Amino acid sequence: MKFSWKVVLLWALPALTIGFFLWQGAFASTTVVAGNNAAATRMSYGRFLDYLDVGRVASVDLYEGGRTAIVEAIDPELDNRVQRLRVDLPANAPELMAKLRAADISFDIHPSQNNGAIWGLLGNLIFPLLLIAGLFFLFRRSSNAPGGPGQAMNFGKSKARFQMEAKTGVLFDDVAGIEEAKEELQEVVTFLKKPERFTAVGARIPKGVLLVGPPGTGKTLLAKAIAGEAGVPFFSISGSEFVEMFVGVGASRVRDLFKKAKENAPCIVFIDEIDAVGRQRGAGIGGGNDEREQTLNQLLTEMDGFEGNTGIIIIAATNRPDVLDSALLRPGRFDRQITVDAPDIKGRLAVLDVHARNKKLSPQISLETIARRTPGFTGADLANLLNEAAILTARRRKEEITMAEINDAVDRVVAGMEGTPLVDGKSKRLIAYHEVGHAIVGTLLKDHDPVQKVTLIPRGQAQGLTWFTPSEDQSLISRSQILARIKGALGGRAAEDVIFGDAEVTTGAGNDLQQVTGMARQMVTRFGMSDLGPLSLESPQGEVFLGRDLMVRSEYSEKISARIDAQVRVIVEQCYEDAKRMIRDNRVVIDRLVDLLIEKETIDGEEFRQIVAEYAEVPEKEQYVPQL
Ligand code: ADP
Ligand code: ZN
C-alpha cells in the first residue's frame, strides 16, 4: 500500500478551510458588538470628564481610532444602575488614557470598522494564497526531483529512511572498555571475511546478533567496527523509524532495506532500538498495534528468506530484551545475545584513552583520576565529558584542558547546565536548609557516601545540589546502606519541615521522595529486607510492559499487596523520623552552615565535615577503592 503527500493534502484541504472559516467567525462577532453600541445614549465630553472625576465611570471602550467611546457609568441615585453612554471624543486626547490609567478604570481599544474590513479581506486572501503556494511547492518538489529532497515526501517508498555507509572507518581499536563483547564479535568479522572457512565444514553462520545494553555503551560503535574491520558496507535504521502512523509503511521499509542489503552483500545491517518493532505480539491494550505486527512479521520473513551464507549479518540493539517477541530470538534469527554494559573503572580508563587521543590535555591531568570520579558513566558520557571539557577550554581561551575544565564538565554531564543563582531571599534560604539537610544527614550516617560539595548554584532542573562522592559501582549494597540513602534523601524535606514548619514545605522534595519510595519499595519487594520476609515479589523491571502484565497475574495476592504498601510506609516513616531528629539535634551547626552557604554559594565536603566536627561526632567512612 502506498501513500503519498498528494492524497494527504487533498484530504487536509477541506479541514483547513473549515478551521479558517470558524476563525473568521470569531472575529466577526466582535464587530457586531461595536455596532450595537451605536444605540447608546449620547453624553458630552465635558460631562464625561466630570463623571470621571467623581468616580462614576466603570469602564470605557474606544472605537473608530479613539474618536468615539462607549462609557459604562454607575448612577448612585438609581441604585447603582449601569448606564451605557456614547461620547464623541476630541481628535487628540492622549491625556485621557493617562487619566483612565491613573483612576484604574478598565478601558479597551477596538479597531475601527473600516480597518477591520480591510484586515478581514486580507485575512480572507492570505490563507488560500499560502495554501496554494504551499501545494505548488510540494508538487513541484516531488515531481521535479525524484532523487532529491522531494523524496522525503514520498514516504511510502521510504528510500531515505535507512543510512548506508560504504566504509565506516571505525575499527575495534576505537571501541574500548567492553572487551568481552569485542572478543565475541571478532568471530563475526571472520564470518564476513572468510565465510568459506565455516561453510566448508558445514557450520551455519549466524544471521543475527542482539546487542543488549543501556544507551551510550557503544552498541552502534561496535556494529560499525565490525563493518569497518571486515571492510563491508554498513546499513542502519532505527526501530522507531519503522513504526509510522500508516499501516504498511514499516513493512515496506523492511523490504526495501533487505533488498538493498542483498544487492550489497556481504554487509552489516544494524537495527537500533529493535524493541520498538520487536515487542511481543498480541500485547498491549486493545489487541496491539497492527502496523508494528506487520513490520515485525515482515522482518521475520526477511530473516528467514536468505541463507546464512549470503553474507548479510544483522545486528540489533536493545535495552529491553525481555519485551522482545520470542520469535525474534529463535535459532536462525537473533540467536546470539551479547551484553554490552556500562564500563567498570578499567573500562572507563580505556574509553578515556581512546577519546583523549585527539585532545590537548595538560600533563597534570590523570585519566585515572577522571575514571575514578565517574562511576556509572557510559562510553558516550565519557566521550561527551571530554568534549565538554574541550569546549570549556576553548571558551576560557586556554591552551590545554586542565582539571578545572574536567571537573566543571563532570558536573555539567551529570546535572545539566549551570543556571544563575537566586538572589538572597526566603526561597534561597529554604533551598539552603534543604541542601544542608541532605548533607548533614549524609555526613552523620556512617553508611552514607561522604559529601563532596553542597551548592546553591542551580543546574538543570535543580535549584541547589548536594553532591556525594560516588562509590564505585558496587554490586552488593547492604540494608543499612540503603536505609542511609533513604534517610539522606529525606534530609532535605526533613530540614524544611523542622525549620519552616509543616505548612511551608515545598515541591522541591518531589524528586527526592520519588527516589525514596522506589528504594523502600525495592527493599520490600525485591530484596527481602522487611518484615514480609525473604520473598521476591516483583521482577526488576516491573510495570513497563503493561500489556502483558494485565493478562498475567502479578506474583502476589491483594492481601500481600496491602502489606507491601504498609511495609513501605513503615520504612519511609521511620527514616523520616530519624532524619528529622538529626536535624533538630544539630540545629546550631545547620544554621551556621546555611549562613555560610548563602554567603559562599558552595561549600566543599572537607570544609563541611570540619565545621560539623566542631559540634558533633563525624564517623569515619569506609569507601571501597577499586584497584586498577
Ligand atoms: P549506543 O549505540 O550503545 O547507544 P553509541 O555506540 O551510539 O552507543 O555511542 C555513542 C558514542 O559514544 C560513540 O560514537 C563513541 O564516541 C562513544 N562511545 C560509546 N561507547 C564507547 C566505547 N566503548 N568506546 C569508545 N567510545 C565509546
Ligand atoms: Zn533534595
Image (cartoon, grey):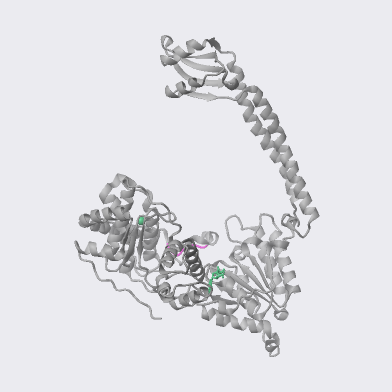
Q: Quadrant of residue 257?
A: bottom right
Task: Answer with left or right where residue 236 lies relative to residue 444.
Answer: right
Quadrant for the C terminus in the image: bottom left
> Residue 226: image x %, image y %?
62, 78
Q: Residue at x 30, y 51 (%)?
A: 496
**Residue 340 is inside the magenta segment:** no
Rendered view: 69 above or below 574: above
Q: In front: 144, or 544?
A: 144
Give whichever of 395, 576 is nearer the camera.
395
Q: How many marks?
A: 0
Q: Residue at x 29, y 57 (%)?
A: 437
Instruction: Look at the image and say whether residue 553 sits in the magenta stretch.
Output: yes
Q: Is residue 28 left or right of residue 451?
A: right
The image quarter containing residue 456 is: bottom left
Where is residue 16 shown, x and y percent of the image? Answer: 69, 40
For image coordinates 51% across by 21% down, the residue present is: 94
Whether residue 493 is visible here, answered yes or no, is no
> Magenta residues?
552-556
In the image, residue 336 sits, relative to residue 501, either above or below, namely below
Horizontal side, residue 283 vs residue 543: left or right: right
Judged from this view, the residue extending furthest toward the bottom is 201
Asked whether the viewer can see residue 88, the reply is: yes
Residue 539 locus on image (x, y percent): 46, 67
Q: Main secondary structure of the magenta part?
A: loop
Specify the quarter for ligand 2: bottom left
Using the image as rendered, state which of residue 504 and residue 95 is in the foreground: 95
Height in image: 98 above or below 487?
Answer: above
Q: Quadrant of the N terminus?
A: bottom right
In the image, 606: left or right of 335? left
Report x, y in % for residue 230: 66, 80
